[in-house]
């Protein structure tokens, strides 16, 4: 089974706001399955509670890929990614990340293939977690806090 992107483009259109971008991507599938095209508008915003969100919604724009990339079906996807700062502990800043996602491949796809591809697609969550992970720093701050309490509190 071949995987990867046949094409990935940023689509520039006049009139888009500074916090919006449109991207297209064609995911490659082996025969007899058709490649899948996804076109999404990404919208970034600062929320009133101080968090930052990126929403992705399907865009109906027609994309000219400039060559024959084979038969394609149009899939749809929508998602909402939100990152918010939470209480720091011992001077170590922390954040909460939430991702809500809906995906439709736009046609028949065998269950074994879905079961193979979805975990790979969700691998981005693991990458985000690893880039924000500060467990060692939080553990160290907790240990310092406990040792300070033990040192300052009279022992009976």
Image (cartoon, helix red, strand yellow):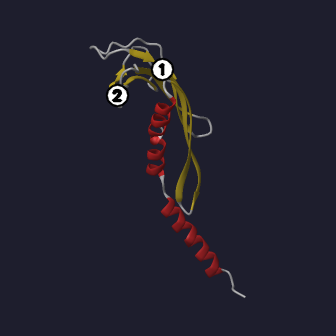
Q: Residue at x 36, y 31 (%)?
A: 1
Residue under circle 1? 75
Label 1 SS: loop
- Tell me if label 2 and label 1 are in contact, CB under 8 Å: no
Camera-nearest residue between 153 and 12 = 12
Tell me the number on the disc at residue 5: 2
Residue 7: image location, x then y, percent: 32, 24
Where residue 151 sits, quadrant-wise, is: bottom right
The C terminus lies in which quarter of the figure? Answer: bottom right
**Which class describes the residues within 10 Å of circle 2: few (<14), some (14-19), or many (20+)?**
some
Q: 147 or 32, which lies in front?
A: 32
Going 51% across and 25% down the picture, which residue do you hit?
Answer: 77
Q: Earlier in the sequence, mark 2 or mark 1?
A: 2
Answer left or right for 39 relative to 4: right
Look at the numbered disc 2 and give the secondary structure of its residue.
strand
Q: CA distance from mark 2 to mark 1?
A: 14 Å
């Amino acid at each position: 089974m071949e995987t990867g992107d046949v094409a990935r483009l940023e689509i520039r259109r006049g009139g888009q706001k500074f916090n919006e971008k449109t991207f297209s991507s064609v995911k490659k599938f082996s025969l007899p399955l058709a490649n899948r095209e996804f076109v999404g508008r990404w919208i970034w915003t600062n929320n009133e509670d101080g968090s930052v969100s990126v929403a992705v919604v399907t865009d109906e724009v027609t994309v000219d890929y400039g060559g024959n990339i084979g038969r394609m079906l149009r899939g749809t996807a929508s998602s909402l990614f939100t990152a918010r700062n939470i209480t720091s502990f011992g001077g170590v800043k922390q954040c909460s990340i939430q991702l809500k996602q809906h995906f439709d491949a736009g046609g028949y796809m065998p269950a074994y293939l879905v079961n193979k591809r979805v975990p790979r697609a969700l691998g981005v969550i693991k990458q985000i977690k690893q880039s924000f992970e500060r467990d060692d720093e939080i553990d160290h701050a907790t240990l310092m806090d406990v040792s300070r309490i033990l040192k300052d509190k009279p022992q009976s």
